[in-house]
């Protein structure tokens, strides 16, 4: 029987910490951290994600705004808005909700965000900083995975870690963070041969693929910590991960459920990133003046 890692509870704790951090920031700098989200188009899933982010930011006392734009918005207008937010002193974090509507180059728009306001951690400068061990903002979901492993008391130093999935959003930054914590990391992907044998080596197994039930019992070493990032739907439309939970849970030492595992951590980490960005910017501004 595995320990079930309760992401909802950990996320709640983080949100409480951020709320206290916002109060302290306000007392020190005379304003609240500002998070601005750009939502272009009418993708229903994106609309829900953005509404949840907006609500969470208000709950912890942050300022900010959701900039809702029609799907017909041109790339120049979108880039113009990003540059306006880049230049606005009260804006600490800018998040471009992806995917953008057809015809808009999401990567190009994200690169227009100032790295110090890149609270999604997707700018190439943020990614470069992460892999070079330099300070920078780190993508939210990967930070959430590490926070859950720490919460569960999983020893990372010297551990064999396998990350399945190599996207710039999840797999690669998770691998970088695990490496930074002295795990021995393997990144597996759709072309990996004998995925089950690779995964079975893992003391820490992170699944970030988007394929329901990909990780079965024979993929898991007894006692391993299993972090399931995947968000999929079953035939009944129920949310489920990449891990066959019922088969893996009796073998694993610790496991995140879906829902209630990694998912709630993503917004909590976005709030934390915004507070980190706000503190860094406000401190630099004060030093610049002093
Ligand atoms: P992605 O960009 O589609 O990347 C998926 C990765 O999985 C790719 O590297 C792909 O390999 C690999 N892959 C696909 N099929 C595979 C297979 N059969 N065996 C091994 N590897 C395989 O997805 P993503 O953005 O990283 O997201 C991954 C999952 O996490 C999705 O379900 C997404 O919804 C979820 N997610 C959840 C949260 C959250 O807050 N909970 C946040 C972000 C993402 P190749 O590179 O070779 O194509």
Image: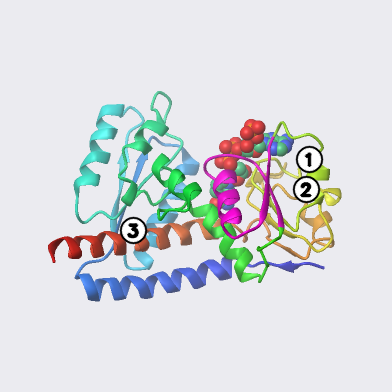
* Residue farthest to the right, as pictured: 218
In the image, 144 versus 213, the foreground residue is: 144
From mark 1 to mark 3, how far is it between C-alphas?
38 Å
Is any part of residue 138 visible from this angle?
yes
From mark 2 to mark 3, how far is it between C-alphas?
36 Å
In the image, 183 versus 5, the foreground residue is: 183
**Label 1 residue near ligand 1, CB within 8 Å:** yes
Q: Secondary structure at mark 2?
A: helix
Give the crowd class for mark 3: few <14, some 14-19, many >=20 residues within 10 Å. Answer: many
Dot 1 or dot 3: first in sequence order is 1
Name the residue that disc number 1 marks. 195
CB-based contact (under 8 Å), mark 1 and mark 2: yes
Q: Secondary structure at mark 1?
A: helix
Picture quadrant of residue 15? bottom left
Quarter of the picture containing the N terminus is bottom right
Name the residue that disc number 2 marks. 199
Asked if residue 184 is among those painted magenta in the image, a careful observer would answer yes
Q: Where is residue 129 shown, x and y percent of the image? A: 43, 48
Q: Which mark is residue 23?
A: none
Name the residue that disc number 3 marks. 277
CB-based contact (under 8 Å), mark 1 and mark 3: no
Is any part of residue 36 visible from this angle?
no
Q: Where is residue 155 shown, x and y percent of the image? A: 68, 67
Give the crowd class for mark 1: few <14, some 14-19, many >=20 residues within 10 Å. Answer: some
**Label 2 residue near ligand 1, CB within 8 Å:** no
In what quadrant does ligand 1 lie? top right
Quarter of the picture containing the C terminus is bottom left
Q: Which residue range is magenta in the image?
A: 160-189
């Amino acid at each position: 029987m595995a320990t079930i890692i309760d992401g909802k509870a950990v996320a709640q704790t983080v949100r409480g910490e951020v709320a206290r951090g916002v109060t302290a920031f306000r007392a020190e700098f005379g304003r609240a951290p500002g998070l601005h989200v750009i939502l272009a188009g009418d993708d229903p899933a994106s609309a829900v994600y953005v509404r949840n982010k907006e609500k969470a930011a208000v709950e912890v006392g942050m300022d900010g705004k959701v900039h809702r734009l029609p799907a017909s918005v041109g790339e120049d207008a979108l880039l113009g808005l990003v540059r306006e937010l880049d230049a606005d002193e009260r804006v600490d974090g800018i998040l471009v909700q992806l995917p953008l509507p057809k015809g808009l180059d999401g990567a190009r728009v994200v690169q227009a965000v100032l790295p110090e306001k890149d609270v999604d951690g997707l700018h190439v400068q943020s990614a470069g900083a992460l892999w070079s061990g330099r300070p920078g903002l780190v993508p939210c979901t990967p930070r959430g995975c590490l926070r859950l492993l720490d919460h569960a008391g999983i020893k990372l130093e010297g551990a064999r870690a396998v990350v399945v999935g190599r996207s710039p959003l999840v797999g690669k930054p998770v691998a970088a963070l695990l490496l930074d914590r002295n795990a021995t990391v393997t990144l597996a992907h759709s072309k990996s041969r004998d995925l089950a044998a690779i995964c079975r080596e893992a003391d820490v197994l992170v699944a970030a693929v988007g394929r329901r039930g990909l990780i079965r019992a024979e993929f898991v070493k007894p006692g391993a910590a299993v972090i399931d990032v995947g968000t999929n739907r079953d035939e009944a439309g129920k949310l489920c991960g990449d891990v066959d939970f019922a088969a893996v849970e009796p073998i694993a030492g610790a496991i995140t459920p879906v829902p209630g595992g990694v998912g709630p951590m993503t917004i909590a980490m976005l709030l934390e990133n915004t507070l980190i960005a706000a503190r860094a910017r406000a401190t630099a501004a004060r030093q610049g003046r002093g």
